[in-house]
Image (tube, rainbow, N blue to C red):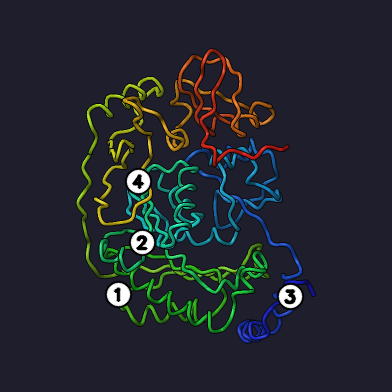
Amino acid sequence: MSTATTKLDEKFIERMKRQLPKSEWESFFAVYQEKPYKGVRVNTLKCLAETFEKISPFKLEPIAWEQSGYYIQEEKIGASPYHFAGVLYSQEPSAMVAAPLLDVKKGELVLDLCSAPGGKGTQLASKMQGEGIIVLNEPIFSRAKILSQNVERMGIKNAVVVSEMPFKLAETFEGYFDKILVDAPCSGEGMFRKNADEALGEWSEENVALCANRQKEILACARKMLKKGGRLVYSTCTFSYEEDEGQVLDFLSTFPDMKLLKQEKLYPHRVRGEGHFAALFEREDGLELSLKEIKENVSKGAEKAYREFEKDFFLSPFAKRLYEIKGVLYALPDGVFDWKGLNVLRVGVRLGEMINGRFEPSHSLVMATDSLNSKRCVSLSLTDNRLEKFLRGETIEYDVKNGWCAVCVDSYPIGLGKAVNGVIKNHIPKALRKASKD
């Protein structure tokens, strides 16, 4: 037996033997002797999956349930410049199964209720292609900050990142959303192989019961926020009946207006991935709420300074609607609601800030930039030694017209630079720079 197998709680083993046919016991427990599968998802806001297949420096194998998802052998995908550019998101293969069930469309109002670190939420956003509003919520503020950073890296323009408890959101958004994803906090049984120490150490039958009660409360809040005809996906990374099939039955009996459309359960001995569960519902009755739209709010001086920068940096205008908070400018997505009263970390794209009367662009702006719309694009290939230097925060030499520029790996922005007589000064935030090899 592997180390992971010997750590399995006897009560968990007994539960799984009751749940699975005897003919599958051996193959199920044998997976804990094997390495978990690794996955990566191409961010189609920046790059088509078929395009990345042609330029990928590592071997990719398609994942059946996600068109832009791939199995990958690479151990440290986070070190890839393409990951830094937001072209890739490292995501466990089975975790990609839930979001496609929602079938989100451009222009819809979408909520990811338990979003951090952002795998499923950014997966949804990629399908929306910048149209509509996607609210990404994480109640724990420290995790919400990580979520916000991933939204920035992936270049999502139509997201609102908030940190609130589900009941607080339910008070604001009753009958508002077309689609809702509830990737609920769970007992984590499906992650025993991938995160053995953490998941195994926290498991108990008591924790399973606690999780099931919490999930019931979260689902009730989610249903309240769903409009008539809206759809909801409930997902977990666990095997327990109480949190999966039992939760579905309880939800349906509690709320007769909810209809179950589809249900999937992935076991690691049946698929190439970890354990995952997902159920798709539709609400057959309910309200349809329209929220007051936030108005533009920007000083004349800030708007003038930004528009001058925009004219110099972009070939065509980037921001339609501007919003200013204490000198910081944002590009608002169309139709975004008035968020007053909510703990909001990010709305749309942070464009930059006013410093001593001049506009200073932000890292968020360049990460949401299409390099084809930039007047000055510094394009570095994977084999160019200047790429690693720039990612480490160093200046590089490059012959380009003076001014702000988008520094890219191939054509995918990785950060802002400022060209001065053939030298590109580095403006990647210090916290995001790669560590030196020394």
Between 121 and 405, the one lying in front of the other is 405
Cα distance between the residues tagged 2 and 1: 26 Å
Q: Residue at x 49, y 56 (%)?
A: 120
Q: On the image, numbered disc 3 is attached to which residue?
A: 5
How far across and how far down the image is residue 140, in percent? 44, 62
Q: Quadrant of residue 139?
A: bottom left
Residue under circle 1? 257
Q: Indicate which disc, 2 or 1, sits on the residue closer to the N terminus.
A: 2
Closer to the N terminus: mark 3 or mark 1? 3
Cβ atoms under marks 2 and 3 closer than 8 Å: no
Q: Which mark is residue 301?
A: none
Please say if 129 is above or below 238.
above
- Quadrant containing the C terminus is top right
Marks 3, 1: nearer the viewer: 3
- The answer to whether residue 96 is left or right of residue 233 is right
Indicate which disc, 4 or 3, sits on the residue closer to the N terminus: 3
Secondary structure of the residue carrying numbered label 2:
loop
Residue behind mark 2: 164
In the rendered structure, which disc, 1 or 4, sits on the residue that comes first in sequence?
1
**SS type, badge 1:** loop
- Mark 4 — residue? 347
Q: For the view shown, which residue lies furthest in the front direction?
A: 356
Q: Amino acid at mark 3?
A: Thr
Amino acid carrying mark 4 in the image: Val
Image-based side of 61 in relation to 354, left or right? right
Q: Does the residue at mark 4 contact the one at mark 3 (Cβ under 8 Å)?
A: no
SS for callout 3:
helix
Q: Is residue 400 left or right of residue 389?
A: left
Q: Is residue 420 above or below residue 256?
A: above
Q: Amino acid at mark 1?
A: Asp
